[in-house]
Amino acid sequence: MVESKTTRPAWSVAPYFVVEDVVATANFYRDKLGFSYERLWGEPPCFCMVRRGGTTIMLKQVSSPGFMRPNRTPDPEDFTWDAYFWIDDADALLAEYQAKGVKIVRPICDQEYLMREFDIEDCNGFRLCFGHDISR
């Protein structure tokens, strides 16, 4: 199936991250990861949607302590992500993130499943993987 860049696919998904500070997190995603957002919801702010390259991450601030649980916390040595992004050029994005001082937690590498990918950790400890297809 060939998707048009002007139409939205029939299905999409948005990770929903529970965070300590929605404003700080939204600004981290904007300033460090190249996402954008149009607004913060709530007074004081408690929700935001950040977007880049057709993807969306929902950020929700809650007031109860101990609420966050990134996927890597049960076993920090395990190979887990909170979100995976299929992108056009992992090498170029890695260079962008290195220039902005983003925490790279797994260097770029080629996988047996024919993806070239790397992992970063956001300001809340969520692990994001970015990869591109190397099968072509």
Image (cartoon, rainbow, N blue to C red):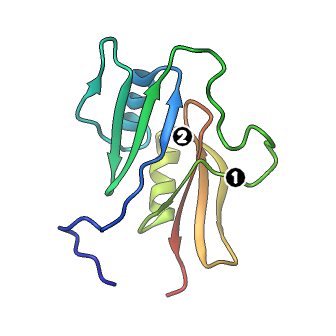
Question: What label does residue 90 carry, if any?
Answer: none
Q: Residues within 10 Å of mark 1 (few under 14, many from 20)?
A: some
Left or right of residue 12, residue 100 in this image:
right
Question: What residue is drawn where x is 37% and y is 27%?
Answer: 47
Residue at screen point 58% across, 73% down: 115
Q: x, y percentage for residue 66?
A: 66, 20
Residue position for label 2: 102
Q: Which residue is mark 1?
A: 80
Q: Label 2, label 1: how many angstroms apart (C-alpha)?
A: 18 Å
Quadrant containing the N terminus in the rendered view: bottom left
Crowdedness near tag 2: few (<14), some (14–19) or many (≥20) residues, C-alpha within 10 Å: some
Q: Residue drawn 30% across and 82% down?
A: 2
* Of pointers 2 and 1, the one earlier in the residue sequence: 1
- Whether 15 is drawn above or below 66: the answer is below
Q: Nearer the viewer, residue 11 or 33?
A: 11
Q: Nearer the viewer, residue 119 or 42?
A: 42
Of the residues shown, which amino acid type is indicated by label 1? Thr
Extreme-bottom residue of the structure:
136
> For numbered disc 2, what is the local secondary structure?
loop
Task: Give the quadrant of residue 89.
Answer: bottom left
Q: Residue at x 33, y 57 (%)?
A: 53
Examine the rendered structure and indicate whether residue 1 appears above or below residue 54: below
User: Residue 43, relative to residue 120: is it above or below?
Assistant: above
